[in-house]
Image: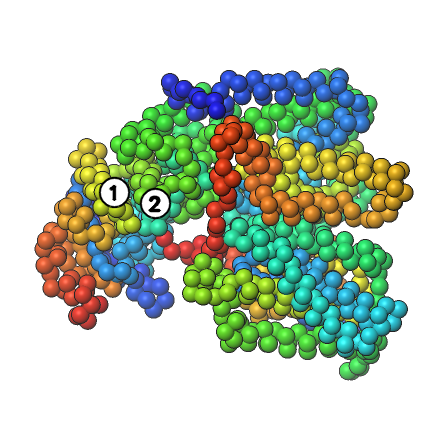
Amino acid sequence: MRVVFKTSYDPDIDLHDHAWKRWGIALLLAVMAALPFLVGDYYLAEATNTLIWALAGMGLMVLVGHTGQVSLGHAAFLAIGAYTDAALMNIGWPFLLSFPVAGLVAGVFGAIIAVPAVRMSGIYLAIATLAVFVIVEEMVILLAPITGGIGGIFAPTIEIAGIGFDRYAALDNFYWLCLVVVALVTWGYANLMRSPTGRSFLAVRDSEVSARALGINVTRTRALAFGLSSGVTGLAGALMGHYIGFFNYELFSIFISINLLLVVTIGGLGFIPGAFLGAILITGVPQLISILRDSANATLGIDLGGIPGLDTMVFSLILIGFIIYEPTGLYGRWLKLRVWWELFPLARRDMFRRQKTYLKTERMR
Amino acid sequence: MVREARGLVRAKNCMEIFQLLIGGLANGCIYGLVALGFVLIYKASEGVNFAQGDMMMLGAFVALGLGNSDQLGLPFGIAVIVAMVLMFGIGWGIERVVVRRIFGQPQFALVILTIALGFVLRFAAGSIWGYSPLVLETPFAGMNFRVGGVVIGMADILAIVVTLILTLGLWAFFAFTRIGLAAQAASQNQMAAYIVGVPVMRINALIWGLSGTVATVAGVLYAAKGAIDPNIGLLGIKAFAAAVIGGLGSLPGALLGGLLIGVVEPIAARYAPGELAQMSPYIIMLIVLVTRPGGLFAQIQAKKV
Amino acid sequence: MSLLAVEDLAIHFGGVKAVDGVSFEVEAGEVFAIIGPNGAGKSTIFNLISRLYEPTRGRIHFDGADITALKAHQIAPLGIARTFQNIELFDHSTVLDNLLMGRHIHRRTNFVQDILFLPKVRREEREHRRRVEEVIAFLELEHYRGKHIAGLPYGVRKVVEIGRALALGPKLILLDEPASGLSVEESQDVAFWIEDMRRDMGLTVLMVEHDMGLVTQVSDRVLAVANGRPLALGTAAEVQADPEVQAAYLGTGDAA
């Protein structure tokens, strides 16, 4: 076990209480930055996709993991981000302007719908976001002059200071762009969670009445969380639009919302690294399935490709398994492993036993 | 002459609206029935079963598999009853095998779990019956009544009648039977219900079974009106809107919400652009949620501190 | 002039008159206790003062201002902190974070500054932390600083909740049954802390309590309520001697 001897309050305030951890993050960033030199285009594209999913996952994590509000409609904010960015670039805005504006539009939209939505709790909020999603989807079709309607819209090539960031022609650059955005958002997110704003999110999540009694404006806090969440998701949507290149409303289906929920639950609710682990899983499993499928086809002569919906099915089973056996997600499992390792051989099985909980009614809020 | 023509047009319009209303009511009943399934589970465990639409789909397919002449070929009535029993078993089984293990976890866990379950059910149905639309053979297919200028399908009438009977029966079950009351108690406070000797687990399983049966009835009524494929479960989302409009804990509320959506939808489709009609159930739901956050028959009270 | 003045306060839930015409004044620097049998409306009075409930009639004045029309989250910034009867802590956070959440009304940074973690945020954090450490030292919570609430024993949680209220830096602290469920030693600690709060911190304490020993030991004045109505007001001894109060507790007279 590493012991941190504290001589001031700063180690508790810092992002990492130990220099060892800081070096770990630096190393990870270095490896990520060097990735274009280490792997081929195919895997680099996958890595880019994973980064975009992690970004969207962080967006949802603020809401579900840290403020305790469930959204089943986050694909709507991906869509708003993607369409705003693409539409603005199509009328000649530079990416450096259209990208933050896309996030801002998604964020403001999220905060606005959050104001009435925050009066609802739990299930009702989840359903309201689902309704918002359906409405946004239909609006995309209705607003054909801007969004291209059913036909779709083209996301122009990104160019900053004469350097191209095309997803195909300059994949390395596009990857680095995504990496920078993700790194900045992660840093901001981690800052948020060690500041009064982040604490107020947790307070609202865990006990609304005492949050109020401490002077926290619950409505405003929730709206802020919703706005930040949808803003970050909007940024991810804009990048996703550029990653896909040409898209219509079908890209942002209800399944995307559900996949996003999968990212945060499997990754580990309430942990920032969870968003990354979840994103790796959600982009990695289809790859794994296709590899298995090919090998099954080659060696056993079984054509698994003939079974439609197998991917979704496998995802669903993984999800069910996690919810039943490891509700704290991949990151929670990792934390337990680490404790076990640090205490070795003193860890006992029952240290990790979950406490029995009983559900109290939500009708009494 | 002109006035006469105008009168004729008005009569025709009137008839058209009436026709839309009947179809809408029948559709609304099916939404209402699926919504009843939501409410059943919500009443018993304060959880929401997002796989309810898929259970309806599976129920319809099981009945089809038992009853259609190219499959098992049982008589229609027997096929439906056997399907209801089988789906009771599946609902019961889902509770025993999966849902029970997350007992006590936050509601959110159940939402995700049942969404995933829905995908599994859809995959199962797709693997067995394929993804192309199939038609359930019913003895009353194509039977119509003509009242004035309005054509009423037998399937529509059946949907309305069966739904009314089921809602009444379920309401009586919760209001008057010991098990029904115990189920409600269990939802209010699981631990307290445990302590006073309510077999919370057994009741939950029973309720899940029951909701499987109700879903089957809804599925058969739905299938009687047209073809089915494994994706009809998405109708569950609309039914969910219905349940929320009514207030999740209220059986008559669910039916009312279903009827409201069922009636508004075709009328909106007739008089507004198609996208708006698609949105209409959700717009209604949002309006209800914003004005009355607990639904029309709200059961939310302030928490005591 | 009194710090807190409650005039003819009443709240009716449907036909139930939970609080019905209660008036009292709490002087600055005083320890004021409200006692009464279960269901007498004691906690309801607290919830009315912290604006969680909407009164049917009556007014509440604090520090010379009418606070009856304020929202619940506007009460804490005035300097009123409270604890809850059934402990409402943030279960998934550490003791330290719970106490830091008590500093919310003193935050001077907005969310943009927080996200960028400007030097100002760090300075503020150090200051919050310094204040919280004072509370930790006062309540002897050093040992539990980094522990999660969910794993703490009941008695410690009660103390943490008092600590969270103190971290807010209030003028008036409302303690809802601070000694219920505590051992004799623990409630003796609570008694000492209440006296210290008054003497050293200059706080005014309003508490609801069942433990007459504690009430007698620390409180200057006691208000007895039953069925939402005031029965007697005076020193602990006077109130205990009141025949109406005795009747309410023993369940003899019609007041029960």
Q: Nearer the viewer, residue A279 or C5?
A: A279
Please report, as a chain letter, where disc 1 is located: C
Q: Give neighbour class at mark 2: few <14, some 14-19, many 20+ (Cα, 10 Å).
A: some
Left/right of residue A156 with respect to residue C222 in the rendered view: right
Q: Disc 1 residue type? A: Glu
The residue located at (22%, 58%) in the rendering is C36
Q: Which residue is mark 1?
A: C186
The residue located at (63%, 51%) in the rendering is B113
For the question of whether residue A347 can be seen, the reply is yes
- Note whether C99 is above or below B144 in the view shown: above
Question: Could you say where residue A363 lies in the image, as x and y percent from the top left?
Answer: 47, 58
Q: Give neighbour class at mark 1: few <14, some 14-19, many 20+ (Cα, 10 Å).
A: some
As helix, strand or loop, the secondary structure at mark 2 comes to helix
The residue furthest front is: A345
Q: Are marks 2 and 1 on the same chain?
A: yes
As helix, strand or loop, the secondary structure at mark 1 comes to helix
Please report, as a chain letter, where disc 2 is located: C
Q: What is the total number of numbered labels drawn onto the structure image?
A: 2
The residue located at (74%, 70%) in the rendering is B83
For the question of whether residue C61 can be seen, the reply is no
- Note whether A289 is above or below A254 in the view shown: above
Q: Which residue is mark 2?
A: C154
Q: Earlier in the sequence, mark 2 or mark 1?
A: 2
Image quadrant containing the N terminus of chain B: bottom right
Q: Disc 2 residue type? A: Tyr
